[in-house]
Image (cartoon, rainbow, N blue to C red):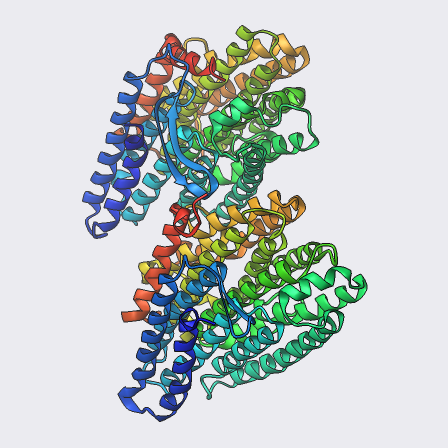
Amino acid sequence: MRLPAVVPELIVAAACLLLVALAGWVRGRWRAAPAAATAAVLAAALAVTAASLGAAPVPAFEGTYLVDAQAQRFKLLILTAALIALALSACHFRGRAAEAHAPAALLFATLGALGLCSAVDLGLVLLFLQITSMASYVLVALVRSDTHALEAALKYFLFGAAALAVMAYGLTFLYGLTGSLDLRTIGVRLAEADRGWVAVALVLALAGYGFKAALVPVHFWAPDALGTAAAPVAGFLSVVPKLGAFAALARFVVEALPPAAVDWPWLLALLAAATMSYGNLAALRQQRLKRLLAYSTIAQAGYLLTAVTVLTRAGGADDALLFYLAAYLLMNLAAFAVAGSLELEGDRAAALRGLSRRTPPLAAALAVALLSLAGIPPLAGFAGKVLLLEAALDGGMAWLAIVAALNMLLALVYYLRLVAWMYFQAPDTTIAAPRAIAGFAAAGLWVCVGGTLLLGLLPGVWLPSG
Amino acid sequence: MLSVTIFLPLATALLVLVIPAAHTGLIRGAGIAGAAATLAASLLLWSGYDSADPALQWRQRVVWVDALNAHYDVGVDGLSLPLIVLTALLLTLTLIYVAGRRERAKMQVFLFLLMGTGLLGVFAAQDLLLFYLFFEVALVPMYFIIGIWGHEGRRYAALKFFLYTRLASLAMLLSFLALYLAMEPHSFSLPEIARAQPYAAATPGAGLVLLGLVIGFGVKLPIVPLHNWLPDAHVEAPTEGSIMLAAVQLKMGGYGLLRVALEALPEVVQRHAVALLWLGAVGVIYGALAALAQRDLKRLIAYTSVSHMGFVTLGFAAAALAGSESLRRFALTGASFQMVSHGLLTGAMFLMVGLLEARAGTREIARFGGLLGRLPRWSALFAVLAFGSLGLPGMSGFVGEFQVLGATLATSLGAALLVLIGLAVTTGLYLHLLSRIVLGGAPASMPALAEPPRVGLGIAMVLAVLAIALGLVPALLTGVIAGGVSGI
């Protein structure tokens, strides 16, 4: 084992332990200290990861952990997302107790997500899923006076505990069939296993991955948790754990599931179709901005799963997955950032009315984010969807590509409704003006908006040259 | 030079963004100057174009997305050059038309210029991914233009417009991706696809790829069962939006059929050409009959637009069916000519209706009569444009429709008969309209009227003069078009 390869994880883990103590101790203006420390840690981890991007794969911890190129690229995205979300939430909670607590929980969740990128042992995967989940429950319940949030956190906790227990049960089947929890060993031995039991194990194991990625039918926590958590935190929760979950899922299906043992692409394709359709249909009826965005993240998870479905069938699927995740983190964080400035009014989407007259820059930022989520060029979501559809067609899943395209059409209805409120309606003067976004939060927002444009115009910056 | 033409509007739009909103005059001036410079640049392209050479000219090709083998690849030929000049011209005229308004000037100028870059890019792009990008960039601003400056039902119309458009572009995108994947190595390059013909063999997927393209371009054109968004969008759009929509945006559909579908899938088009021919013929007659039933002047013009654009579908299908090379060229030249002519005449028609509405506050045909006495200038111009639209020889409408009709006659007598009936209906329609509102007696409910502003009439006059010039000397345009048509 070579220690330098896991330096980012080690820094983050060490900082987590220190921050817990620090967060409980600071008062007054020192409440900003944990956020500053977290930012420094994330930036350092980001720099180390970026510097080692081209390095050869390094196994660690007795072969249960693998730092390879794919893991590094996922980690880069996770750390970037965490840094932006930190900037947003630090400004959002300024002067409140949560200002000190948020960074610690955020960093814990980030640690879990980082681990998911590299874990090649299913026991470790479960452990990291738990770490991320624990921190996520805390993040939802961050503002202790908000009873709705506490209720959502409790539901989230119960749901998560159940989903991860189901996954653990599934892992016992895999262990029983192969005598190992190592992905590659499972992949080799599963080829001779009984197909029926493999299918059972797969379905059970997917509960855990699906829970973190918010896939149908284990998505129920998402609208409640994301709809009640503070907007920047909701943004974080909809991006970072999802990045970790997709990284782990991609590794799981490619390495541990030989096509001969189980026809997993079809199962995932059905899940993808169900997830995107459900997310979009449910989002159509939402009147609250964060809840609508929560359903939109479910739909987006369905698109992402499309790329996972064809990972072994289409050459560009892994790049499509990574690209779409990058696009998703930027546009989704931007949308939640603007939602954060509007949530004072009980999060009614009506607060968007006439926003283009009240604060043109905020309206423009949200419009860019929403149009990108809808896949309109020249924005990142457009390039991502082109890559996804290309991968799906290339992988022989033309029907899934068509389902995805129809879903993109459906999604346009609710994204456009928000845009229409902002641009086509007069401001509602009974609703308080949106809170200004300034300082680091503004920087975070505009990095997201700029990145959304950049990835749309020049997708090549986050694609390996072909 | 071509890239300069394409991106001049965008550069101006970005410049406008940094001007403070209070400086309305400066914003308007910058917008008009940028559009005029674009027009000048496009005329330079025209003057430098060698119509004897069928190859793409002003070609520029650099790597855009390496991983997808996509290029920033632009070039023009005789098919696209007239549409580029048309776009620049109408963009300039439209911005001049709205120059007097103060309300949300910055946003308006920005959106029109952004749309300009999208439209110019569509007509120049030789890479399908780039084409798709420009295609949507041209459409999104129209959503905002309808939704912000439109009439009462604007939000519904804007949403409907965008949803139809999105349906079309997603179908188109799937077809583009299918073409891309069928190429070995994968490529979005249109000239390469046209050379390699990946779907030359009768594979089952080929029909679906064509279907995607026909839906994609057919919504914009519009081909008749897909036209439903158009009357709503036109009626609810502000005049300046209707002008750009009718005069230029619909041409993206026609151009796409000729450029992409016919070049990339000629055999597949030929296999389905009879059906497409009938779709075109039905469009001609349906648009004419539907226009007959309208009471709203703008809705009437919108339906005649459907009828006129049916000729483009017809020309496209007739070209695929044509037995001889000369007949094929005849059909394609006709379809291209019709697109330019329709851009001038219908753009001007929407402007005239808008001018009248601005004065009268209504578009209801029954409330007008005897306008010749009250608004002599408006009436004279309207009459000229109406005669042009009904296809009077000596004006541009005649040339394209005549050529397409000739080509149709040679391929299918039945379709040609249908088209002839449609033409007769259109003629009757315009004559009836003229006798009713320009001549005739004024109804009691007619609002008090004053002659529209000179700027508006001047712009319509420019378009009418161009339509007459092209009608009298079609060679001005056919010479250029012929070069491009021989390449398809």
Relative horizontal placement of residue A155, taking residue A337 as reference (left or right): right
Name of the residue lying farthest toward the front: A1
| Image location (x, y in percent) of residue B205 | 67, 33
Residue lying at 47% horizontally and 25% vertically, measured from the top left: B191
| Image location (x, y in percent) of residue B469 | 34, 12
Compare residues A67 and B53 and report the one nearer the observer.
A67
| Image location (x, y in percent) of residue A204 | 71, 70
Residue lying at 58% horizontally and 29% vertically, measured from the top left: B223
Residue A288 shows in the view: no
| Image location (x, y in percent) of residue A257 | 68, 60
Q: Is residue B297 above or below residue A111?
A: above
Relative horizontal placement of residue A60, taking residue B58 as reference (left or right): right
Q: Is residue B487 above or below residue A440?
A: above
Q: How many marks?
A: 0
Compare residues B368 and A154 and report the one nearer the observer.
A154
Relative horizontal placement of residue A186, taking residue A229 as reference (left or right): right
